[in-house]
Amino acid sequence: MKDAMEIWQIFHNGGPIMWPLLACSMIVLTIIFERTLFWLGMAWRRNRALRDEILTIANTMDWQQIEIKTERSSDSIVQVLKMGILHKDYDMTRAMESEAQHLLKKMSQFMTVLDTMITVAPLLGILGTVIGIISSFKMLGSSGMADPKLVTGGIAQALITTAAGLTISIFTVFPYNYFKSKIENAGHLMEKYATRLEVDYRKLQAKGVQ
């Protein structure tokens, strides 16, 4: 109970800017939680064995077997390969690119918001500090140096918003970079498997196999 009161006192001392900073922190926590669940789901649906098996079966041109094996798979790379195979007679490359872009867009959801919070939170903190310092100097102008503690105390309280803004930004930058690396890695794997499928299919076409 005492700790909660101390936290509320610090929050109150930070002034009105603490409310938008609180909103920023709630947004950040919600997105991090949602993206964590998303990537855990992606990891759970991953099926590396099936990816390699599709490429092996594709060399035998048994498209029906691939359709059966991929019917219930929700692995992102399997989906890209499946889309390419379904459109092999039209434009395999563009079909896989389109599916990959669609999946990468889902993976990148809310990343712009996190990036914005990394920038906005410290700026809000600085704004709160500037407002607090202005208030302290106004107090100094009206009361003179009769009680310097009022001024220094006001400045110390004003710095609370800067500390809060920096904390939110620092806390956000680590998961942001982690999620960004996951997206880049997923894009690399999609490109790798799609290229292998396309090259193998072109080889079969060159040999006259349909």
Image: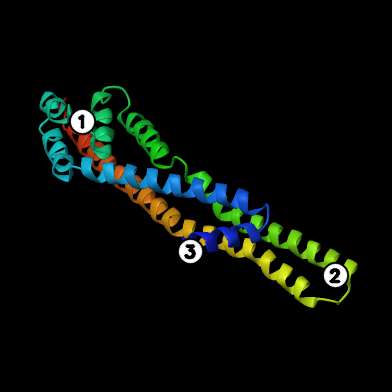
Q: Nearer the viewer, residue 107 or 152?
A: 152
x%, y% of residue 11? 59, 58
The residue tagged 3 is 3
Q: What kind of element bears circle 2?
A: helix
Which label sits in the foreground, 1 or 3? Answer: 3
In this image, 198 relative to 124: left or right? Answer: left
The residue tagged 1 is 205
Specify whether residue 165 is in view.
no
| Total marks placed | 3
x%, y% of residue 57? 11, 34
Kind of residue indicated by mark 3: Asp
x%, y% of residue 195? 28, 42
Q: Are marks 3 and 2 in contact (CB under 8 Å)?
A: no
x%, y% of residue 52? 15, 43
Which label's residue is closer to the chain start, 1 or 3? 3
Q: What kind of element bears circle 3?
A: helix
Q: Residues within 10 Å of mark 3 (few under 14, many from 20)?
A: few
Which label sits in the foreground, 3 or 2? Answer: 3
